[in-house]
Image (cartoon, rainbow, N blue to C red):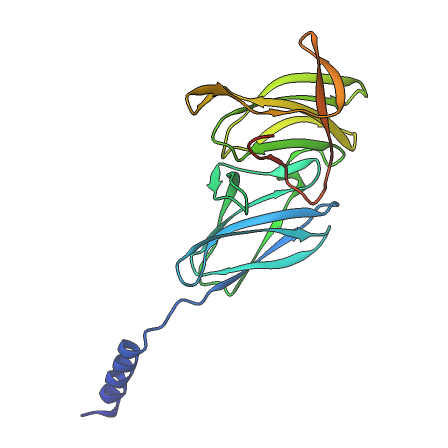
């Protein structure tokens, strides 16, 4: 038998016994903006498991490897104090029980390295402002009133914003470093009786003709949102 045929047969047998596996792509994300950005990613790992990880801190101008995948796609959600990068792809939660409207990115899965640049032009919001973002872990909807300094420097009280489990609510923007909130859940039955829970603080402000105690919240630039637990 000719040597070429033997060689081809040997290569075929070797491939059958040791199939070539796809090479994972190292995925980097670059922050092209002038502010530090926090990034969460959702992807399929080398074992076929769906993973959501974050938040990763990316200083202005930095590029960082965030994941390895063979799938040729990943999703991300990013934010800074006044802006967010979000799209139509629903990502699983990052540590807490809420979902994120992420952006799905696809690329050639044969690449050894892929880099995705976060563009300020693609963000929603304003870097000079702070976005009030809230969510709840509760099975019952929560209704929130907020008191904040508007963009003209005037104090405003707005109500009612509905928080639903699994959803991030984007509330007013402000230039101040804090805001106030007051809230209560919808009424529900517990052991046959109607009940609810409230979020009440030590700062009295007028709300619908009554004085209610609001809670002060200082912005934390490393936190995506204010996550309310059940029971106040």
The image quarter in which residue 218 lies = top right
Quadrant in which the N terminus appears? bottom left
**In the foreground, 8 or 151:** 151
- The extreme top residue here reads 209
Task: Give the total number of marks visible in the rendering.
Answer: 0
Question: Is residue 176 something that shows in the picture?
Answer: yes
Which residue is located at x 43 percent, y 25 percent?
191
Q: Position of residue 144 (x, y in %)?
A: 61, 22
> Is residue 122 shown left or right of residue 155?
left
> Is residue 104 shown left or right of residue 223?
left
Question: Is residue 149 something that shows in the picture?
Answer: no
Quadrant in which the C terminus appears? top right
Q: Position of residue 176 (x, y in %)?
A: 79, 30
- The extreme right residue here reads 153
Q: Is residue 180 above or below residue 107?
A: above
Which residue is located at x 63 percent, y 17 percent?
159
Q: Is residue 50 above or below residue 176?
A: below
**In the foreground, 193 or 183:** 193
**In the foreground, 100 or 148:** 148
> Is residue 88 shown left or right of residue 15?
right
Q: Is residue 57 above or below residue 22?
A: above
Q: Position of residue 65 (x, y in %)?
A: 60, 60
Which residue is located at x 27 percent, y 87 percent?
7
Q: Is residue 207 above or below residue 55?
A: above
Q: Position of residue 29 (x, y in %)?
A: 61, 54
The image quarter in which residue 134 lies = top right
Which residue is located at x 67 percent, y 50 percent?
31
- The extreme left residue here reads 1
């Amino acid at each position: 038998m000719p040597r070429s045929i033997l060689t081809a047969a040997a290569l075929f047998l070797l491939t059958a016994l040791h199939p070539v596996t796809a090479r994972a792509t190292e995925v980097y994300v670059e922050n092209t903006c002038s502010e530090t950005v926090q990034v969460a990613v959702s992807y399929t790992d080398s074992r076929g498991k769906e993973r959501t990880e974050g938040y990763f801190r990316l200083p202005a101008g930095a590029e960082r490897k965030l994941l390895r995948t063979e799938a040729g796609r990943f999703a991300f959600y990013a934010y800074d104090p006044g802006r967010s990068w979000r799209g139509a792809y629903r990502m699983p939660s990052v540590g807490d029980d809420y979902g994120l409207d992420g952006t799905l990115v696809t690329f050639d899965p044969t690449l050894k390295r892929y880099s995705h640049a976060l563009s300020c032009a693609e963000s929603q919001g304003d870097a000079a402002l702070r976005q009030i973002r809230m969510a709840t872990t509760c099975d019952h909807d929560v209704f929130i009133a907020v008191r904040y300094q508007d963009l003209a420097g005037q104090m405003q009280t707005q109500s009612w914003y509905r928080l639903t489990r699994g959803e991030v609510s984007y509330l007013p923007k402000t230039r101040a470093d804090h805001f106030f909130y007051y809230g209560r859940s919808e009424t529900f039955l517990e052991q046959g009786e109607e009940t609810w829970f409230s979020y009440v603080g030590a700062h009295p402000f007028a709300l619908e003709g009554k004085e209610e105690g609001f809670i002060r919240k200082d912005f934390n630039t490393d936190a995506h949102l204010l996550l309310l637990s059940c029971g106040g």
